[in-house]
Amino acid sequence: MSLRLAGAGRFGPVRRPQVFWAGLEGAVEPLVDLAHRLAVAARGLDLPVEDRPFRPHLTLGRWPPRRPADGTLPERLAGYRGPAWPVTEVRLWESHLGATSRYETLAAWPVG
């Protein structure tokens, strides 16, 4: 399985963007399938699941709330295509958002 960064986007409107991300190309089908299976399992446990379609992506950053932000940045990177790399594992991350955001690996599984 190999992937590459391709294009960019944001979650949230241009005037109040929240998350800046890079899209993924390549063998994304296993990621989409995994997201679907996780959503089905979560619904079976009566856990909340977002209703929007899954977009394979890599979060690059977050815009601080109530601060000026350049929500057009993703459009300027729309044509970007990076080199491919092999995927060797999938990680489950927990986000601890705040003034000093940090991310913690909860689990990792080998691919292949």
Image (spheres, rainbow, N blue to C red):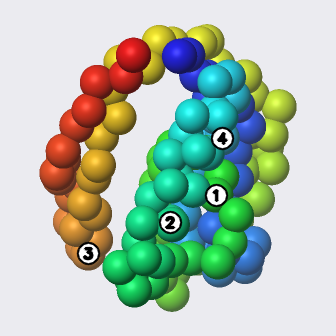
Residue at image location 47% in from the left, 77% down from the top: 43
Nearer the camera: disc 4 or disc 3 = 4
Residue wearing tag 1: 54
Q: Quadrant of residue 110?
A: top left
Looking at the rendered image, the disc whose residue lies closer to the viewer, 3 or 2, is: 2
Earlier-in-chain disc, 3 versus 2: 2
Q: Nearer the viewer, residue 78 or 54?
A: 54
Q: Earlier in the sequence, mark 4 or mark 2?
A: 4
Image quadrant where residue 31 sits = top right
Tell me residue 99's x, y (percent): 24, 73
The residue under label 2 is which amino acid type? Ala
Q: Which residue is mark 4?
A: 23
SS under mark 3: loop
Question: Residue 97: x, y in percent?
Answer: 28, 71
Quote the CA–CA distance across marks 3 and 1: 25 Å
Q: Nearer the viewer, mark 4 or mark 2?
A: 2
Residue identifier under label 2: 39
